[in-house]
Amino acid sequence: MTSSESDFLPKLVAHIVAVASGNAGKAPSERELAEHFAVSRGQVRESLAILEALQLIERRAKSGIYLTMESAGLSSMALLATAGVQLQPRQIFEAVELRKIHEIKAAELAAQRATGDNLDQLRDILARSEKQIADGLGLHRLDGEFHLEIVRATQNEMFYKICSSFYAASEQRLPIYFGKAERNIKSHNEHMQIFDALYRRDSNLAQALMNTHLGRAQSYWTEILDSGGEKTGEQAELPRARMT
């Protein structure tokens, strides 16, 4: 996929979701999409083929193109996040739950396999996190760096690629979670405890700490999604699909 194609896909997805959401799930036609974006129908057709392979859309004979977001897999969710499309509550919950399962195992393996370079990277992230908090800024980006460095420390490249997709899919939600100062401080303190367990090669403790750490985030999102955001108002801040 070329850079121009990778730039076009999120815009195309955002537009399709915005239109289909108000049209019983039916997306614009190839011709309408080509006219909207001022591109060739060939480019639209190729991009739609990618979306169909990702199970984000389906073509129905003599009917048209339809949105099928409920079938979205992990790669699809990362693309939706890039496009600024809000995932369905069930998809968010399942992604958070799956991330927790993977990262608890990652903590165990990292305690056994982390190299000196991995530990140095984690120290650097913690130092930058401390400065970020002192400056009154959120940790949403550094949180991802910290967790992905732990996954990298498993020395399993496939594991890293899978978990990277989780963070790509949650990119827009993390600033919401880290929107409160006390949550940043709590998360940073837990990160330091996890690092200490990794440094001491204590696999059991690293797993337990990661379980508690991610369990807190899982409980937060479960409450938000179950309440529809009414209790905190934070669900209203979740980004919607951008009209393009």
Image (cartoon, rainbow, N blue to C red):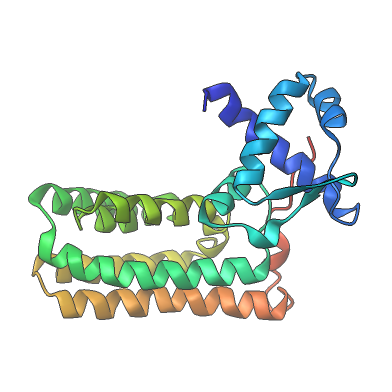
Where's residue 39, x and y in %?
76, 19
At 15% across and 54% down in the image, what residue appears?
Answer: 119
Whether 12 is drawn above or below 63: the answer is above
Residue 8 location (% of width, % of height): 65, 29
Name the residue: 60% across, 45% down.
53
Residue for point 86% across, 39% down: 28
Is residue 220 shown to the viewer in this render? yes
Q: Is residue 171 above or below residue 35?
A: below
Q: Residue 228 or 167: which is nearer the viewer?
A: 167
Quadrant of residue 186 within the rendered picture: bottom left
Q: Is residue 135 left or right of residue 14?
A: left
Query: What is the tally of numbered marks visible in this picture?
Result: 0
Q: Residue at x 43, y 64 (%)?
A: 184
Left/right placement of residue 131 relative to residue 140 reads left
What x and y, as percent, mark residue 73?
A: 56, 57
Residue 214 percent location from the top left of the image: 40, 73
Q: Is residue 223 left or right of residue 210?
A: right
Observer-nearest of 55 and 107: 55
Q: Does residue 130 show up?
A: no
Q: Nearer the viewer, residue 191 or 19?
A: 19
Which residue is farthest front? 61
